[in-house]
């Protein structure tokens, strides 16, 4: 009996070690909206203060980290010969780090691209900008027009495909989402944009539908969002000049809202019974949309618009009754989520591409220069801390237990309490 009890206790101990790691399995986390339930994330940090570990990485990639089971997963793009030559071949990779010490556990090559800049890439973009997704021991890594792959938790490739090639503008950016047995992503290319779903077990195309838009510039970089309205699943997929709600089983359209905008990046947010999104370039407009319509609901289901200081790149936050957004120039807006009435608009950060994070009453904002700003999530601006890592940061935060995981141009930092 004593031996049995000891075995049970040992098993429980090992299980607790495995399950104690809070997962951050996709872009913007487990709730898909930038919220974390961590209660003691660090308030202050620098290149030396509160650094649990720092791991240098070669290459250049702006995909955000994800976390599961005590490991951190990232995609990367490493030059084969010369990092400064944009036309040099790139090795597109997926790697895993130990979340406790930052050591690289494995690093797997998925594709080699002989001329990655053949279509051109924006100076703020990279060849690995799409954030991977983790589910049930598998990592799904998407490299846009370069291809898509699935790996197991030990870095072995289960499948990979380059079937859905297309001509991009400025490179790739949007991340995939998992819906039941499908892996779905937007392919908003230079011409003939489309949305596609792969069978997540083998990578075969299950459906592919054209993006029905009248936009002159059809390229965009958005990550879809799965929601449920009155018991029905909807895939919210913004693109140039249109946001569509699709039936994720086959891609058929449920409703749409029209607008003027292209190069749409921010992932939509679903809260307070509304979809919150931004319309992209050249003049972004924040929209709040009721998602319970059918057909073209542009004139009936847009609850409010905000035409000043909406983001081109960072995604939004909704915290209770309050709506927050960070414009690309670093100006932050706090408004009533249901009405759009502005509580305050203040410049907080420098230029921003990363999406903000909410945890335990605080909002974390990372600007492109590598400075993290922490503000109170309140109807009056209160700046709590300013923290500088000293090098460019365009990737969004991930959370591992009570630590921040921050990807900079050259490294991954684990920021905790030291």
Image (spheres, helix red, strand yellow):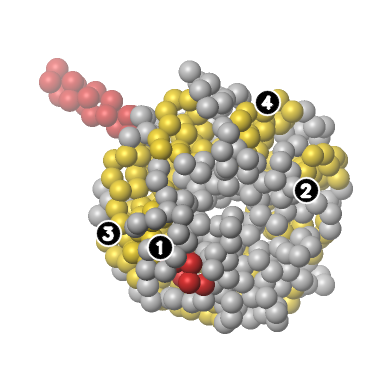
Residue receiving disc 2: 337
**Distance of label 1 from label 2 (alpha carbons):** 47 Å
Mark 1 vs 3, N-terminal side: 1
Pick the residue in front: 260 or 123. Answer: 123
Mark 3 vs 4: CB contact within 8 A: no
Q: Position of residue 177 (x, y in %)?
A: 49, 60
Q: Kindly state the secondary structure of the residue where label 1 is placed.
A: loop
Tell me: 102 left or right of 271: left
Q: Which residue is mark 1?
A: 88
From the viewer's perspective, is 192 left or right of 302? left
Please name whichever residue, 280 or 41, is drawn nearer the observer in this view of the structure: 280
Secondary structure beneath dot 4 equals strand
- Left or right? Give the position of 254 relative to 301: left
Q: Answer few, some or many: residues within 10 Å of disc 2's Cα (few below 14, many 20 plus, some between 14 and 19).
A: many
Q: From what the image shows, is residue 89 above or below residue 68?
A: below
- Residue 234: x percent and y percent? 58, 66
Q: Give the vertical position of 162 relative to 376 (above or below).
A: below
Q: Residues within 10 Å of mark 3 (few under 14, many from 20)?
A: some
Using the image, tell me which numbered label, if any, was put on residue 385.
4
Q: Residue at x 71, y 63 (%)?
A: 280
Does residue 287 show up?
A: no
- Give the number of the disc on residue 401: none
Q: Residues within 10 Å of mark 4 (few under 14, many from 20)?
A: some
Q: Quadrant of residue 373?
A: top right
Q: Nearer the viewer, mark 3 or mark 2?
A: 3
- The Cα atoms of the two marked residues, 4 and 2, are separated by 26 Å
Q: Which residue is mark 3?
A: 157
Give me the residue at 35% from left, 57% from top: 81
Q: Is residue 229 above or below residue 339?
A: below
Q: Earlier in the sequence, mark 3 or mark 4?
A: 3
Query: Between tags 1 and 2, which lies in front?
Result: 1
Q: Secondary structure at mark 3?
A: strand
């Amino acid at each position: 009996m004593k031996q049995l009890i000891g075995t049970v206790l040992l098993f429980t101990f090992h299980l607790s070690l495995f399950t104690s790691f809070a997962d951050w399995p996709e872009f913007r986390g487990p709730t898909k909206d930038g919220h974390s339930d961590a209660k003691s994330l660090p308030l202050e940090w620098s290149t030396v203060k509160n650094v649990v570990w720092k791991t240098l990485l070669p290459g250049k990639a702006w995909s955000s980290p994800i976390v599961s089971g005590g490991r951190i997963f990232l995609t990367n793009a490493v030059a084969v010969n010369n990092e400064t030559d944009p036309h040099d071949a790139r090795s597109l990779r997926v790697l895993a780090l130990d979340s406790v010490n930052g050591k690289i556990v494995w690093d797997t090559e998925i594709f080699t691209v002989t001329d990655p800049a053949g279509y051109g890439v924006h100076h703020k973009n990279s060849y690995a900008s799409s954030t991977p997704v983790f589910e049930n021991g598998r990592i799904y890594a998407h490299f846009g027009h370069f291809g898509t792959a699935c790996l197991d938790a030990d870095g072995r490739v289960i499948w990979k495909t380059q079937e859905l090639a297309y001509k991009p503008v400025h490179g790739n950016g949007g991340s995939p989402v998992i819906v039941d047995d499908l892996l779905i992503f937007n392919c908003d290319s230079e011409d003939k944009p489309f949305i596609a779903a792969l069978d997540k077990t083998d990578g075969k195309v299950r459906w592919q539908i054209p993006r029905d838009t009248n936009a002159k510039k059809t390229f965009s970089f958005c990550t879809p969002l799965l929601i449920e309205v009155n018991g029905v699943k909807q895939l919210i997929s913004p693109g140039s000049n249109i946001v569509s709600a699709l039936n994720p089983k086959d891609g058929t359209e449920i409703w749409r809202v029209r607008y003027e905008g292209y190069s749409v990046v921010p992932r939509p947010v679903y809260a307070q019974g509304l979809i919150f999104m931004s319309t992209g370039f050249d003049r972004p407009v924040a929209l709040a949309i009721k998602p319970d319509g059918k057909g073209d609901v542009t004139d009936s289901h847009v609850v409010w618009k905000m035409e000043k200081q909406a983001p081109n790149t960072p995604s939004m936050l909704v915290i209770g009754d309050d709506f927050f957004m960070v414009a690309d120039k670093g100006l932050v807006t706090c408004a009533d989520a249901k009405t759009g009435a502005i509580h305050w608009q203040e410049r907080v950060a420098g230029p921003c591409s990363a999406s903000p994070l909410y945890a335990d009453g605080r909002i974390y904002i990372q600007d492109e220069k590598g400075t993290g700003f922490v503000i109170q999530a309140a109807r009056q601006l209160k700046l709590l801390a300013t923290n500088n890592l000293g090098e460019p940061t365009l990737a969004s935060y991930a959370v591992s237990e009570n630590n921040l995981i921050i990807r900079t141009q050259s490294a991954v930092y684990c920021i905790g309490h030291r």
